Amino acid sequence: MKTIIIRTFLAVAAAVLFTNTTVAQRNFGNPTMLPEAPVTVTIPAVEPNNRPGPAYNSALGQWPGYDMDHFDYVADEYILTGKADGQDYKTRMVIRRPRDMSRFSGLVLLEPMHPAGFAHGFEHNSVYLMDAGHIAVEVITLGQEHLAFNADRYGDHHFNPNQTSEVLAQTGALIQSPQSPIAGSGLRKVILFGTSATSYMLTSFLPTHHLFLQADGTKVFDGFLPTSNGTRILPVDVPMIQMPTQHEYMNVATAVQDGDEPGNQFRVYEFAGVGHLMARHNPRITPQLCEQKPTEYPLELYFSVALHHLLEWVDKGIEPPRGDRVLLDRNVDNDGSLMVLDAHGNAVGGIRNPYVDVPFATYIAGNTLAAGQDPGLAAVCRLSVYEERFSKDKLRELYGSKANFLRQFEDNLNQHEAAGWSLPVYHELIMADARAVEF
């Protein structure tokens, strides 16, 4: 079953990985009954899922020691029942929130569960989300097969892929309605997050953004964050930050330019070194799975930078900084990459960070499956980054001593924090990586 799921995911992910096509006109699953004019979104029925047996856990990939227990967060599971694209559906919604709702920031990240069964929006931003008191909402639009392990709890759930865009709108409207499980908590803004296959769901939703309205006539979502996505996405009438990763921008990612004026509030953030799939703290990537050492590069830190700036933009009107794009020479003959590489084999340009400015490793996108592993999991390796650590001789040649390396590394980190390219909540976690480097 796992092999089938991963291969299904690959078919979807291929649409957003190595292409540069316009996705604004696509509709996920070819919905057959889109309204011709804007309509008020129907609010689905919602009830707590108190059925027997264990709940499905889609958020295993959290930072050790900084999980939901550490931040005193809880996961509440609900059953959503409604009609979309002219058909009935019943699906799962999870709200990950502070146990003490007085800590709630008023800001919500909503995501469709990744079809391979993961709440990547929460996983890829978990420390930042919970430290800030934000809420993460997950709804299943694809991947119902992951619930089959507990028929007593989920046996009557059913969903059609053609319903995806409308159900995303309905879930977003529900969260902001009087029927919401968090009604009265001070909610202010909701953004829609996607990564890889769920970025495809997000971009497929964009043509319907103007069609599905809340009861007060406002749009359902206040902003959009498509990540691990290099396709050409056209701006809409709310802020959007697109975040291609090295898997995308090394193959020529979007050339759409940043903008600040209404209707064109758009940013593209290309962080040097970041990969399509989280390799660190990812329980699906075992030490034996891939041929090369999975990277310790902390994808979560830089996804969270983009999320933080988007939330500040939609909530406070603070325009985010503009970031440089990674430089391309589009020539593989000189160094094996379409990117311009520095003397250490890392990307030149893009948004910088101490991992590439004061490096102790080379970060390479596209690992390979180790011999004897399940061939259906090859995609997990291919979509992750591996690293080649520098030798102790090279580290001493570059920095002289570990103390000098740590000074340079932290100085660089402080500069990026001051410029808005690193979040203070991650400072000590980043420095722990530097302190672990062996000279």
Image: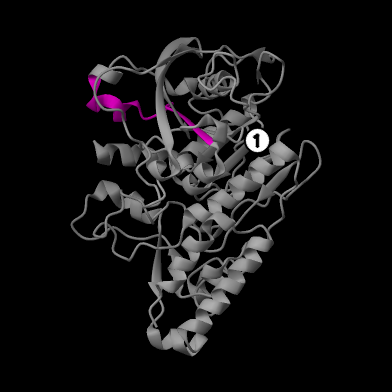
Judging depth in this view, the residue of 423 and 221 nearest the camera is 423
Q: Is residue 269 inside the magenta stretch?
A: no
The crowd level at tag 1 (other Cα within 10 Å; few <14, some 14-19, many 20+) is many
Name of the residue lying farthest toward the right: 261
Q: Is residue 147 inside the magenta stretch?
A: yes
Q: Residue at x 53, y 47 (%)?
A: 128
Asked whether the viewer can see residue 428, the reply is yes
Whole-percent x, y for residue 306 in the image: 60, 49
On screen, residue 394 versus residue 319, left or right, reads left
Judging depth in this view, the residue of 19 and 122 nearest the camera is 122
Judging depth in this view, the residue of 224 and 102 nearest the camera is 102
On screen, residue 63 versus residue 201, left or right, reads left
Where 109 sits versus 403, above or below? above
Quarter of the image that includes the N terminus: top left
What is the span of residues highlighted in magenta in the rendered image? 135-151
Whole-percent x, y for residue 259 in the image: 76, 46
Q: Residue at x 69, y 15 (%)?
A: 38
Q: Residue at x 55, y 18 (%)?
A: 174
Query: In the rendered picture of this protein, how many numbered marks are placed on residues?
Result: 1
Where 25 sits versus 242, above or below? above
Quarter of the image that includes the C terminus: bottom left
Residue type at mark 1: give it: Gly
Judging depth in this view, the residue of 374 and 222 nearest the camera is 222
User: Which residue is label 1 attached to?
Assistant: 223
Whole-percent x, y for residue 414 in the image: 62, 67
Q: In which quarter of the image is residue 407?
A: bottom right
Whole-percent x, y for residue 159 in the image: 40, 19
